[in-house]
Amino acid sequence: MEKTEVQHQVHLEGAIKLLTGDLKEEASRAGTDNHLQRWIEDLKAANNPEFHKLVVALQDLKALLHGGTYNGSQVGSLLHRLGNETARTASFADGNTRTHVEKLSAALLAAAGQLQGSDTTPEQDLQNNNKGLDSNV
């Protein structure tokens, strides 16, 4: 059965909900692996080489969270990298899915900030990251 755009959006919303909750509590739940695996499968199904870094980072995150305990600094750094990479790849999403991807990027950056002790908002992180990306072009 082929996944629809709505199914992809549901998976993105599930990831956003996971990230906006208590990450320590979420990491201890069995369903966390399933959320991350669906996200990985959606990215792989898109068959876009631009998503490779996201898939690798998500697999790393899944491994870090698998045991239910994790190093907050490590996870925070990985979430920040995922947030930046997700923001970069949002342009590949179509229609309403793009909005969900942008929300997911903000949620990743906010979760990273909580774990790393950042005082910036997700919007500030995105603006700072966009400045960095623009300068590399």
Image (cartoon, grey):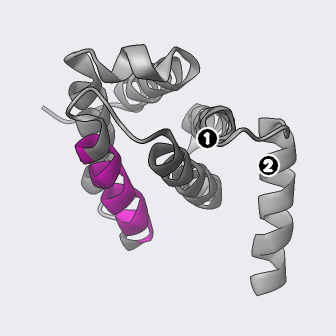
Nearer the observer, 78 or 67: 67
Determine whether, in the image, residue 32 is placed left or right of residue 117.
left
Which of the image's four quarters has the C terminus? Answer: bottom right
Q: Position of residue 99 (x, y in %)?
A: 65, 35
Q: In the displayed structure, would residue 29 be above or below residue 125?
A: above
| Marks 2 and 1 in Cβ contact (< 8 Å) | yes
Q: How many numbered marks appear?
A: 2
Q: Earlier in the sequence, mark 2 or mark 1?
A: 1
102 or 69: nearer the eye? 69
- As helix, strand or loop, the secondary structure at mark 1 comes to helix
Q: Position of residue 41 (x, y in %)?
A: 24, 44
Marks 2 and 1, Cα distance to the nearest angstrom?
A: 10 Å
- Amino acid under label 1? Ala
Highlighted magenta segment, given as a residue range: 50-63
Q: Main secondary structure of the magenta part?
A: helix
- Residue at numbered disc 1: 112
Estimate the x, y position of residue 69 in percent, counting from the top left.
31, 30
Residue 82 lies, with reference to residue 7, above or below; the image says below
**Closer to us: 66 or 51:** 66
Tell me if I can see residue 46 in this picture.
no
Q: Which residue is drawn at the image coordinates 58% and 39% (left, top)? A: 108
- 125 left or right, relative to 74: right
Residue that badge 2 annotates: 125
The residue located at (26%, 15%) in the rendering is 29
Residue 9 among those drawn in magenta: no
Q: Mark 2 Cα within 10 Å, few/some/many (few <14, many 20+)?
A: many
Is residue 70 placed above or below 125 in the rendered structure? above
